[in-house]
Amino acid sequence: MNADAFRFLRAYMESPGKIAAVAPSSPYLAQIIAREIEPDDGPVIELGPGTGAFTRELLKRGVAPEHLVLVESSPQFARILRRRYPRVRVLPMDAARLRTTSLFGGTVAGATISGLPLLSMPAGKILSILAGAFQNLGPCGAFIQFTYGFTCPVPRRVLDRLDLVSARTGFTMANMPPASVYRITRRQVHSP
């Protein structure tokens, strides 16, 4: 077992509600997530980056370190991220507080990548996270979320309340457990 896998397992055992995975996301899932991002789309917010599997792929894809903000509530994972990605801004906070934080000094982000365990969260917290994320996203910005579940992990009532739609954009069996990826956008982006 590598060091990151051990860290995840330990964090999961300490707080199964906060850490939904027993291992870091696979490189295959990270590639599916990163292909949703174009470096010229604007800054990127990453929620729940853990040890940085998606961060690494986003940087490989060409997202500039100064255009990436990592929001991580685990102090242990936040320290690891700061050490691994010294040019990337790491905010040690709960993603439900996004509405109260200026992430890019007035510039809107092009996308939010989420590794948060939405399936284990109450709908009110998911609503706060998505409302804060979309407050920081431009009009065509997308919220990219992966899940181990069979459907979008954002409850329909939350999507409807925020006027959002979701579409499944990827799936991989090469992750433990297998995972699907959803792209969530404002409804009017899809209007004819």
Image: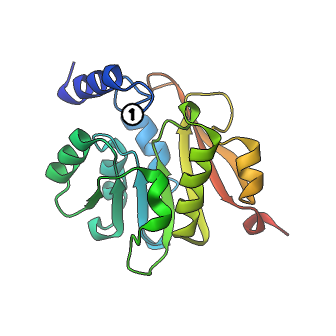
The residue furthest bottom is 106
Q: Is residue 64 left or right of residue 128?
A: left
Q: Secondary structure at mark 1?
A: loop
Q: Where does residue 111 sit, x and y in percent of width and height?
A: 51, 62
Residue that numbered label 1 is attached to:
25
Does residue 82 show up?
yes
Residue 163 or residue 101, whichever sits in front: 101
Q: Where does residue 62 sit, x and y in percent of width and height?
A: 34, 63
Q: Where does residue 129 sit, x and y in percent of width and height?
A: 54, 53
Residue 74 or residue 189, whichever sits in front: 74
Residue 128 or residue 46, whichever sits in front: 128
Q: Where, quadrant-wise, is the C terminus in this rendering?
A: bottom right
Q: Amino acid at mark 1?
A: Ser
Does residue 38 show up?
no
Above or below — where is 189 with respect to 60?
below
Q: Is residue 191 left or right of residue 16?
A: right
Residue at 49% over, 75% down: 108
Identify the image quadrant of residue 61: bottom left
Residue at 76% over, 62% down: 187
Q: Badge 1 local density, few (<14 within 10 Å), some, or many (20+)? A: many
Residue at 30% over, 27% down: 11
